[in-house]
Amino acid sequence: MKDKLLEIQKKALEQIENAKELNALNDVRVSILGKKGEMTNILKSMKDVSPEDRPKVGQMVNETREIIEAKLQEAKEALEAKELELRLSTETIDVTLPAKKNKIGHRHPNTIALQEVEKIFIGMGYEVVEGPEVELDYYNFEALNIPANHPAKDEQDTFYITKDILLRTQTSPVQVRQMEKGKLPIRMIAPGRVFRSDEVDATHSPSFHQIEGMVIDKDITFADLKGTLAEFAKEMFGEDTKVKFRPHHFPFTEPSAEMDVTCFKCGGKGCRFCKGEGWIEILGCGTVHPKVLKMSGINPEEYSGFAFGMGLERIALLKYEIDDMRLLYENDERFLSQF
Amino acid sequence: MKTSLKWIKSMVPGMENVTPQEYMDAMTLSGSKVEFYDELDGDLEKIVVGQIKEIAPHPDADKLVVCQVDIGSEVVQIVTGAPNAVVGMKTPVVLDGGRVAGGHDGQRVEGGVKIKKGKLRGVDSFGMMCSIEELGSNCDMFPEAPADGLYVFEDDAPVGANAAEVLGLDDAVVEYEITSNRVDCYSVMGIAREAAATFRKEFVPPVVKETGNSEDVNDYISVEVKNYDLCKRYTARVVKNIKIGPSPKWMQERLRAQGIRPINNIVDITNYVMEEYGQPMHAYDYDTIAGKKIVVRNATKGEMFTTLDGQEHELDDSMLMICDGEKPVGIGGIMGGENSMITDDVKTMLFEAACFDGTNIRLSAKKLGMRTEASGIFEKGLDPNNAIEAMNRACQLVEELGCGEVVGGVVDLYPVKNEPITLPFEPEKYNKMLGTNVSVDEMLDYFKRLELEVSADKKSVTIPTFRQDLLSYADLAEEVARFFGYDKIPTTLPSGAATTGKLSYKMEVENIARDVAEYCGFSQAYTYSFESPKVYDKLRLDKDDKQREAVIISNPLGEDFSIMRTISLNGMLTSLATNYNRRNKDVRLYELGNIYLPKALPITELPEERMQFTLGFYGEGDFFTMKGVVEEFLSQVGMTEKVTYDPAAGKNFLHPGRQANIIYKDTVIGYLGQVHPLVMKNYDMKADAYVAVIDMPYIVEMSSFEKKYTGIANFPAATRDLSMVVPKSVLAGDIEAVFEKKGGAYLESYELFDVYEGAQVLTGHKSMAYSLTFRAKDKTIAEEDITSAMERILKALKELNIELRA
């Protein structure tokens, strides 16, 4: 019996050794451990073994079986590893082939610039509000201290619908509408479309966008305006950006200023981009005129504020170095896909 | 506004050493923004007054001569081809290594032209004698210069002197951007006053002396103003025994630097005073004034009048005329008449300095299509007090220049005097507004330089009438800020209660629209809000379509921009067409923009502005691609209930069999479809395009971002497949409506997995197969629950003439 077991074991180990494929290995398993396998036959013949020898023989049988099984397992793992290796090697791809992309659309540069501005002011606690594009003359002019005979009201610049209704020429009327709501303090920006009677060319469009900003609170000063806009300029155009405020005139702010920033291309040294000046004009601003506050129902003795306005297209053109404003309204895919 | 820097400096002693660049920087920071300056002698180098001592013929050239020229320090040999070279003549000479501004043709060369000694046809030449053009000017500005040839100096020009200085070209012309509130700065005096305050120097304006002989002007002329609203002041004086001739060199130099051509003494004086005081003046030939009388009145409608430029104009009754005893002689503040203009033979003239209403001048000039130098100034609204000063200054110059005899006295009609206003002096308020700590003494100094008079008790400030812009403490705070320096004001951040920064809900929804569109491959477009009414025809709208009722712009930039859009498709289709014509492939665009719907016509109130989310594409994709984008968007804004589609959308601009209204909770929230081939033809595209338009106000109203977890189903689902033969007229939507209505609580979902039309199916029918999934939340679903639901569904399907497939 023992010899027989040893012989089976020896034969089995040889066959396992010779099996080069998983299928062959499986055949070996079946021929030895299967229903009609040799070990199974041995087990079946156990009934012929005398009862006193049975435990011993049984142990021997089990030992042999375990050895074969262990060997089978080992061989199987080795063959599997080999097969996997082979498969992986055939599956090698050229990782430098082009990627398969979802074609994602592109946001318009106007919107990208606007959202950047919005993000900065939202971070400073400003609410983003809107007002009508077709506006009353009162909000666009009169309530902003632009009296009836002001040259800015001349038909040259303003599109009129009726005597009292026009296409807003600025986003400033949103200031007035916000003040009239009577909720103070106010920190707002108002982006939107505005209209002026300018023929289309590389730097003009009869329809463009502005971003208006306003703060109304107790004790707001011109110094606060300077600080706020200097902060904005740094966020928007880079940490090293410097600002310069020049006196200017707007009917609805007093004192008024224009703000220049150091050229973001040459850093202020002067280049073709900034026409050698080192500075680029970015926005108009000022302390809200007491008359404007009063007209909107706010007591100028108690409250003060500042306001500013900038051209969105101007910022987009400068920031992305777009040389022709018409590109912004043509919507050529080859243009849009660059943003 | 331009000024000569030399002229400014002449009124502000102590500024002699200020360079043009320093001047530009300082003036800009104090509020008179300098756009640029031009140094007249910037390109002139080593040019002196030379005198020709000898002229000899050139041995090898007929057209050249060889001159010996005294340049003060030595005599040099210069070869010239100038036709007017004569012995004894003094002319500008550029020496070896010097520069001139341009060529003889009058074209200025950037950076100038370098001149070196050399040989001309074999003869040494140590420089060049110059024409006025080579010095960067022209015969218009220097009327005495010969049209062709060397510039000739007066006999008293010192030999060897700097020629640019002798010609008055040692000056810089400065161009300013003057803001509309500073009418006073449209004058040399106004700018000089600003310069004096900016550089903290004394301002020394010209001293105007009493003028006139012993006669009385009232014996010469009487004036009647019939409309003081339009003519606030009218002053007149008379000058007789006029001797027309050139004005002196100093006056010509200043006029030239202002860009004004010297003409003759009388014209030059009016121009000079105009520049100096910012007050337009007019001179009439007194002998043409009928009845010794001036009448200022409105024109009569249809009246014709010929201005001194020879143009005839038709007037209306809003325009102001200057008339004599019989006829009009000028359009007030705009242009004088041909019939009364002064000529070289003038003997006696009538000087006018008036103050006309700015708005009226602006409107009249516009109506007449003649915006003149004078009207451009008057329309800003002048200080009437300036008129008399200018008048007397002009007469002073007439006497000084000896070009006539000024008649004594002034006619001055000025019934309502413009008085200076007084404001409280509130230094603390100014500082509070600015966030500064400027001392009172400092403020007093600024104000003094600006001629703002602070009372002895420091309680009030008197504002001179030429500063019409100073009306409140805010205006005075700005004066403090300007001269304290905007750059010196501290930078702080607003204190006070914190506020929450945020986008409006509407904007948040719009951002989701952008995100979804872009993830689906659509790029953002911006198109105009106004368009042509022809768009309606391009889009095949019915003649009585409500969308033809638009807000109309009364003064558009042409018909193409004349109406506010009532439909967003034209912008989209135009943009797609642009891409198509440029051969861009597979273009997908979206736009978020308003349409403008009138509430009533004619317009009496603001129109309704409705944000439209418009999507369009051509190339890869079909109707269902677009439908997928729409549904993705609706699901992203939390509109999770069943969206239905009504093919009877009735859009003429869409394919009749490929269009649908998008319906959510019984509301049409938009539409989508394939663009009608005829519309595509109107936009010159030979492709299929699909569009969707979603009316955003509905989305804002119906969207919801409240989310609640409903658990994950634990019990198994059961599916039933339905294979049907369906009449062609029945839509998938009709079948799905049955599922929705009859499926009961356990019907979890359904999915169409096959549609087939063809040979094996009964004609007029299609085969459709759905898989229905049933599930109960709280138990394993019972067979009878499924059966009863299926029975209800089948019964309802039968009513639609749908049969189960055998």
Image (cartoon, coloured by chain):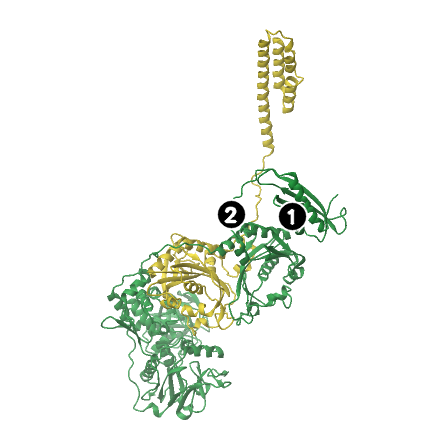
Chain colours: A yellow, B green
What's the amino acid at mark 1? Answer: Lys
**Residue hosting label 2:** B707
Secondary structure of the residue carrying tag 1 is helix
Work out whether residue B583 can be spotted: no
- What residue is rendered at 44% in x and 80% in y? B334
Q: In this view, does B560 lie above or below B636?
A: below
Badge 1: how crowded within 10 Å, few (<14), some, or many (20+)? some
B539 or B406, nearer to the observer: B539
Name the mark on residue B742: 1
Marks 1 and 2, the one that precedes in the sequence: 2
Q: Is residue B157 left or right of residue B542?
A: left
The reply to whether discs 1 and 2 touch (Cβ–Cβ < 8 Å) is: no
Name the subunit of mark 1. Answer: B
Secondary structure of the residue carrying tag 2 is loop
Instruction: Give residue A39's position: percent from left, percent from top.
Output: 63, 15
B99 or B403, nearer to the observer: B403
